[in-house]
Amino acid sequence: MHGTTPLLSALNLRKTYVKFANKIEVLRGVDIDVAEGEFLSVIGNSGSGKSTMLHLLGTLDKPDDGCIHLEGRRIDNLPAADRDQLRNRTFGFIFQFYHLLPELTTLENVMTPAMITHSMWSWWLKRGAIRKAALEMLDRVGLSHRLKHRPQELSGGEMQRAAIARALINRPRVLLADEPTGNLDAANGQHVMRLLRDLNQQEGLTIVMVTHNLELVHHTDRVVRLVDGRVESPEKIAMPTFAAAGAGT
Ligand code: ADP
Ligand code: MG
């Protein structure tokens, strides 16, 4: 069983975007707890605020109201420098379109977050260890044979696995994944999904994954749905979700 204090906890998150004369109330009081070691999936219609919520949880953006705690410590109102440091150490992100730097090799892409975390001097001292960590991580995601390839020389699945290795290089507490298989064919999507499940089960990595593929939800511990700017209770969505995805597959 999980501990009593959630690893990540959001209370009454609100976020409104104002575009010209339009006000879009995207999040209207989101409450969500993520337990340590949990693999949580978040579903919801396109435009329901899934990405917005993930960005708030990972301190990439600030809520208009509400608060976010990491192990009981408030993190949404930290000064920018503290927040950047916390984000680099605590959260790993992966996205639908990988966001690899096109001019860098696979190995260099994976090393990048570790470079950002260190000062120039400490990077120089630690570069051997960082390179070793990147090589280990690339081995973990099955890309040891693609170290010198650039992103355009990789398949979609390989790019996403490189992005996963990059997200994990600083050993984050939580991996935040925004539609990580959204741009992959079925086989590559399954490969990435299996990798995430293994990282969760074998290494205890906590994962919050946004998806609109209901079949993927079966591979996760729990699912919540964003509806009308709030999190719908799991009991309400369990049946239709699993029925729609074809139970037992
Ligand atoms: P989802 O990921 O569930 O598809 P998003 O969180 O990306 O939804 O977006 C929710 C709504 O907020 C959408 O209507 C989107 O157009 C709007 N939105 C998202 N980001 C911004 C922004 N930076 N400025 C204005 N509107 C935005
Ligand atoms: Mg989105």
Image (tube, rainbow, N blue to C red):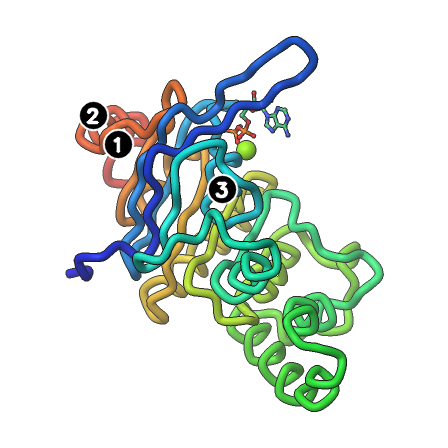
Q: Answer above or below: position of 7 versus 169.
A: above
Say which quadrant the C terminus sits in.
top left
Quadrant in the rendering for residue 200:
bottom left
Q: Determine the quadrant in which ligand 2 lies.
A: top right
Q: Nearer the viewer, residue 52 or 106?
A: 52
- Give me the residue at 34% from left, 33% from top: 12
Q: Is mark 1 within 8 Å of ligand 1?
A: no
Q: Nearer the viewer, residue 117 or 220?
A: 117
Return the residue at label 2: 236
Return the residue at label 1: 242
Return the residue at label 3: 56
Gap between marks 3 and 1 measured at Cα: 28 Å
Hey, what amino acid is under mark 2?
Lys
Task: Give the mark toward the camera: 3 or 1.
Answer: 3
Q: Answer above or below: position of 60 versus 100.
A: above
- Are the residues tagged 2 and 3 within 8 Å (C-beta)? no
